[in-house]
Image (cartoon, rainbow, N blue to C red):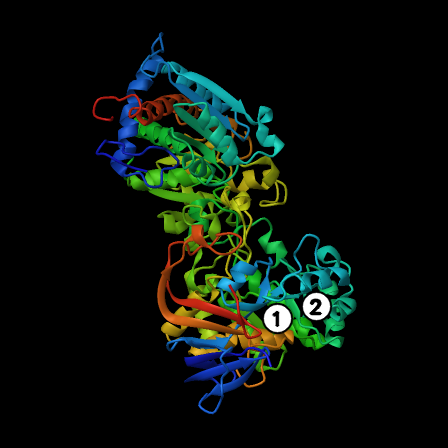
Amino acid sequence: MSDGVHPFPHRHLTGIYGLQPHEILFLLDEAEQWVTLNRATAKHDERLFGLTQINAFFENSTRTLLSFEIAGKRLGMDVVNMAVAQSSVKKGETLIDTAVTLNAMRPDVIVIRHESSGASQLIAEKVDCPVLNAGDGRHEHPTQALLDALTIRRRRGRIENQVVAICGDVLHSRVARSNILCLTALNAEVRVVGPPTLLPRDIERMGVKVFTNLEDGIRDADVVMALRLQTERMHGGFIPSPREYHALYGLTPERIDRLAPGALVMHPGPMNRGVEITSALADDAVRSAITEQVEMGVAVRMACLDVLTRRRRKVEGWA
Amino acid sequence: MSRALALRNARLVDPVAGTVREGCLLARDGVIEVLGDLDHITLRSSDAVADVRRAVVAPGLVDLGAFAIDLPGFTAGGITRAALMPDQAPALDDAALIQRAAAAGKPDVWIHPIAAATARLEGRELAEIGLMKAAGACAVATGRARIADAGVMHRLLSYAAALDMLVITHAEDEGLTGAAVATEGETATRLGLAAAPAAAEAMAVARDLMLAEDTGARLHFRQVTTARAFELIRAAKARGVRVTCGITPAHLMLSDIAMTGFRTFARLSPPLRCEDDRRAAIEAVRDGTVDVICSGHDPRGPEAKRLPFADAAPGMAGAETLLALSLNLVRDEVIDLPRLFALVSTNPARLLGLPGGRLEVGAAADLVIVDADAPWKIDADRMAGAAGNTPFDGLPVQGKVLRTIKGGQPLG
């Protein structure tokens, strides 16, 4: 997977797992220039001109797909989206056959989202170009963790020693796993908070503290991150009802004021307003960083696309 | 008189007597005629005589529960009889299907089909197990899953008890396992795999022990893999329940960490367990709670394994590696050599009511010749059998099957 002595010696980005802290920080530092560019009137850089990016999304996504598409286009790439509804996956083609087919079209980077844990790694083993994981099952969603880390660093000044409470459906969340790996690598103190039915066993071995009571979990936190609760899990399956979930685990301005005043509030989106977070908190311009997360998403993805294609672009020092 | 086979300079393993002794073996007309000393025997020029150079000569392996008829794999693994699971296409739920399966391996390897307990293995209506027994079924099995409905399982056990048929079941509570592909724990959590608590096994074992006790049936758990399930079986045996259990080398040698990197060859059913459960399994072999070590042979091609972990089919190709991996138990002094052959040959033969598993005059000359120390490396790309889906790819092992002999005839 890795070679050379570059600041980022990996061919692919399939997860935060396996990245060194300095490599994570390198990507965050690289992203800063793109934050600046994206805030300018002319948001274009031609350094990836002529390269082809395929976004292979086997699972529905609007926000992440759009974010990757904009990131690629702002760097001058030809971006092609493969939506699953139009693909032969529906006709029984295996994931590896799809990967080989995509590979034959000679893309320069493949961005993949898939409902199965491990899918992006499987594809990475079969193709010649860099693979960027945009979410695989419950496993990892590395660019989300990077954009969250960038948001925290910009808003709180640092990541080290920040107390970050990740609240909600940790069991089914790739965002939670990548964030745990990323934030613990950068020496934040990470807590996971949720009903026991939505916490995976032995999660504390990933270096986090586990709380089943929300108020204990967010007390004195510097960052409170809500996770999305999937609709199909709301009614009797893992929790009794959305109403009960909101009562026990919902993030409200009152709770934040009382237990973690000054905490930064985050959510990977899309939100269930009134379930895991109230509108009043989500839309709070001071405390909520939710729209900033989306903004950082484009910058972080530009950084990843740039860095992962440096070798094939024969950038000096990377060839 | 037919041509005889004489093996000289052998280490003869008798699992029934529990002995290893040096000597010779003479087989004629498919049975063992002489054991020990050949000095008084006149061999004819047409007889085959081989000096096996102190190799182990033991009863051929009897594999309790293979999922495919894979003659090259069986022969390479020293398996002379394989009990075939009813999970075939179609399921072995009819006497004609049993008859056809029983003929599939002869003369090299004898296939002993196991009858499906319920029609299409759906766990609802009892299959014609009496007719299947008459057609040659050696036991009855619930298949890859257990029978969810306790009422159906109760009726199956009472009915099979009257026919004196062994009932082979799978121990996982389907409510707890659901769509899980792994055991709950750090590895499954890190990989983001749907996981079930290990207690799913003990719960299933507890229910079926109650039912076996109530009906007096002979019950065999094909694979038991957790400490708490072993405790239940140990206690049940002590109070006289007619229960036995088996395991595969995978659960004796690997823990759930083997799934790291989404290695689909380590996707098994039941899933690999935590290290504490693995150690408990070793202890259960040591103290005799485990009766059988089987291959669980389930060859799967790339179309079933080159997939994301959760989408891949469970199962491993185990026939060729069964003996070499099990020999680790002897080297680690968990059990001795005769006991090992009891676990892989004598016990399964006895449970299924099959000839074989014995090294004595008059017994069938179904034998395996093994160099117990020969080192080799398991290579998934160079397996003799139908597929190379082994979680032990690349593992150096010791113990090579030199020859498999069926009815006095060397195979392969």
Please tell me whether mark 1 or mark 2 is closer to you in this view: 2
For mark 1, name the chain.
Answer: B
Residue occupying image coordinates x 62% and y 58% = B144
Residue occupying image coordinates x 40% and y 30% = A132
* Tag 1: amino acid: His
* Tag 2: amino acid: Ala
Quick one: which residue is furthest to the top in this view?
A41
Image quadrant where residue A140 sits: top left
Q: Could you tell which of marks 1 and 2 lies nearer the N-terminus?
A: 2
Residue position marked by numbered label 1 in the rendering: B220
Q: Position of residue B199 (x, y in %)?
A: 54, 61
Image quadrant where residue A28 sits: top left
Which numbered tag is attached to residue A132?
A: none
Which numbered tag is attached to residue B137?
A: 2
Where, quadrant-wise, is the C terminus of chain A in this rendering?
top left
Between B145 and A270, the residue placed more toward the observer is: B145
Do we see residue A240 in this rendering? yes
